[in-house]
Image (tube, rainbow, N blue to C red):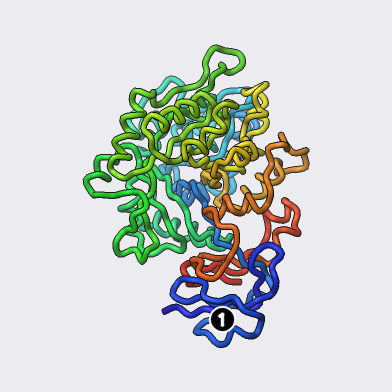
Amino acid sequence: MDDLLLRRVRPGLGGELTDVRVNDGRVTSITEPGSGGFAARVVDGHGGTLLPGLVDAHVHVVQWATFRRRIPLGAARSAAEAIELLLAHLLATPAPQAELVVGAGFRDGLWPDKPHKDLLQRALPGRAVALFSADLHTLWLSPAALKLIGRDDPTGVLLENDCMSATAQLPTAAIDVQDQWMAEAVSAAAARGVTEIVDYEYADTVADWTRRGAPATRVSCVIARHLLDQAIERGHRTGDVLPDSGGLLTVGPFKLFVDGSLNTRTAYCHDPYPGGDSPGQLELPPSSLVPLMRRAFEHGLLPAVHAIGDRANTIALDAFEEVGCPGRIEHAQLLSPADVPRFAALGVIAAVQPAHQPDDRDVADRHWPGRTSRAFPYRSLLESGARLEFGSDAPVAPLDPWDGIASAISRTDDDRPPWHPEQSISLSDALAASSGGRRGVAVGDAADLMVTAADPSVLSPADLRTLPVTATILGGHVTHQI
């Protein structure tokens, strides 16, 4: 039986100084300072704030772990500048000629020029180069990289399904190396107070996490579309605890895509994008979406449906209504006013990523003109009774819930004024959306906890982004302490 005493902590925002005892993975007492007695392990909170552990409800963990080692291209304001950043990095850190050059994080939604394979060929003749967009929906390949995976393409710029299938064909690090990267990435997440992640990697997450052993967080293993039959054969059901995982691994939801993304202009909308007649890209029409959702639900797997554009969200909500099942819509970035109350009415969770809002404000202003008052509409969703759950979508944004919390409160992440501040939400609501709905710490609660160095309620949003986490506790076990 675990026996942990947290001395001198303040449970909840504005809480009083107490001692908190944890036994067998649960909070068993909250007493006056100095009255907690002895314990097998004592953690001094130094007067910090004790809060529920944080949950990142949308992560691509392998890609995040790998992204941390890719050439960063997020600062590029054009295709030409992306190549300049690439060359500058290779000049400073040369890579073997035969090695695949991988960069990530570019956002071409506002670029004055277009990415093309010929640009990469001129800059790095004969080199295999693969550049990932920040939203993971675009892959920019050189001719040598296309040849490496047995493909040809007139531009070398692959979108949506082509992007994802090509990504799966690219060379990767050895499994043991990837697993080491994963362990480091998850430990870094624990250092930010994270006690659970939902892994949306497009792979057999159940088998991969079972192989890796006990992680430093709980992991919900999402079922990819192409693995539905396998999951049913294995008898997996959403929420099931996987055997031999110490209770840390569970079966997650079943992931489907209705549309693409804003930055690639493939988010499926009711109105066309400016300068053309395309409303975006419909990845899964209702005639295919509904049967897949129904089959999954009949076998105990709850759907998690990717929908970004307003028309995609209408289609997803219509499908949930027709199937009659609960579940999640991932992203929900642009909503028709009539669809906002349907989330609560249908029991559909709005699984959103607040850090995307400041990242995408400029591209939304350009490509969703006249509609941005209903983009990233967190307050409207909350006021309608919907349940919000926050994620990062790492590597699209860093795996750090504090970044999302600050963005949800402030609607900005720089010195510009808030973007549609009428859709901002309170700190307490943002923390709840980042903690699986938990709003405090009480006797009987699961001991997935964190101690922050200061009370978040007295900090500015900018300070929240760098708030030190002094301890993280997972099921009564300390996974991080400074």
Q: Is residue 142 visible?
A: no
Quarter of the view holding residue 339: top right
Task: Decide which of 200, 124 is in the foreground and name it.
Answer: 200
Q: Residue furthest bottom?
A: 38
Q: Quadrant of the C terminus?
A: bottom right
* 121 sits left or right of 225 in the view: right
Q: Residue furthest front?
A: 345
* 350 sits left or right of 469 in the view: left
Give the image location of residue 39, x and y in percent.
Answer: 52, 84
Give the image location of residue 78, x and y in percent.
Answer: 63, 29
Give the image location of residue 381, x and y in percent.
Answer: 59, 38
- Above or below residue 173? Residue 111 is above
Q: What residue is drawn where x is 41% and y is 45%?
A: 201
Check disc 1 and report its element: helix, strand or loop. Answer: strand
Count all numbered tags in the image, as a single digit: 1
- Above or below residue 333? Residue 34 is below
Identify which amino acid the numbered label 1 is placed on: Val
Q: Quadrant of the N terminus?
A: bottom left
Give the image location of residue 164, x and y in percent.
Answer: 40, 34
Q: What residue is drawn where x is 48% and y is 80%?
A: 3
Task: Decide which of 157, 467 is in the foreground and name it.
Answer: 467
**Other-residue count near label 1 (Cα within 10 Å), few / some / many at <14 / 14–19 / ≥20:** few
- Above or below residue 35? Residue 322 is above
Q: Which residue is mark 1?
A: 42
Q: What residue is drawn where x is 57% and y is 41%?
A: 385
Q: What residue is drawn where x is 54% and y is 38%?
A: 134
Q: Is residue 457 visible?
A: yes
Task: Decide which of 148, 362 is in the foreground and name it.
Answer: 362
Quarter of the view holding residue 151: top left
* 163 sits left or right of 358 in the view: left
